[in-house]
Image (cartoon, grey):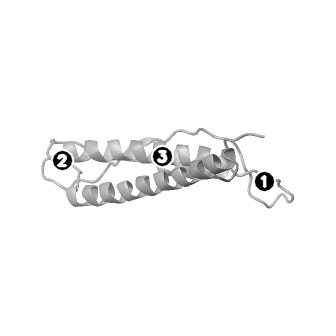
Amino acid sequence: MSLSSNTLRSLEHALQYASLRQKVISNNIANADTPNYKAQDVSFKNVLEDSVNAISATRTDPRHFRFSAGDSSSEIVTESGTTYNSNGNSVDIDTEMANLASNQIYYESLIELEKGKLSSLLNVVRGGQ
């Protein structure tokens, strides 16, 4: 029996995603006045694939979706074709600040979930006392 579960691994991947997204958003804010800087974001597709890959399922019908293993890393993508400023910069500071606040709430909720999971494990180790 393993103490580490899919839940802890999923939370770890989600925390890595949130941490990387925080860095990317901060970088966008820092470069808000840099000419020709293109805003970046973290691809959610890989995080979604990771979550799907963590699900173990048996395909009982050929019409069912396939579950396959994939890369567990997130990808930074540069927004192209969007220009908000006359200097070629595509950073919208209001959008980035909203993304920063949203990501912070997401990160803090993940921390609370992980604290609850680890607290439950500690309770089991102590014998329910």
Direction front: furthest residue: 129
Q: Is residue 73 left or right of residue 22?
A: right
Direction right: furthest residue: 60
- Regarding residue 75, the answer to whether it shows in the image is yes
Marks 1 and 2 close (CB-CB < 8 Å): no
Quarter of image, res 69: top right
The residue where tag 3 is placed is 15
The residue where tag 1 is placed is 57
Give the quarter of the figure containing the N terminus.
top right
- Regarding residue 50, the answer to whether it shows in the image is no
Front residue of 86 and 122: 122
* Gap in angstroms between the C-alphas marked 1 and 2: 45 Å
Residue at image point 60% right, 43% down: 9
Quarter of image, res 103: bottom left
Residue at image point 43% right, 48% down: 18
Amino acid type, residue under disc 2 in the picture: Ala
Quarter of image, res 76: top left
25 lies above or below 64:
above
Is disc 2 surrounded by few (<14), some (14 to 19) or many (20+) residues within 10 Å?
many
Is disc 1 surrounded by few (<14), some (14 to 19) or many (20+) residues within 10 Å?
few
Mark earlier in primary sequence (3, 1): 3
Residue at image point 42% right, 52% down: 107
Mark earlier in primary sequence (1, 2): 2
The residue where tag 2 is placed is 32
Amino acid type, residue under disc 3 in the picture: Leu
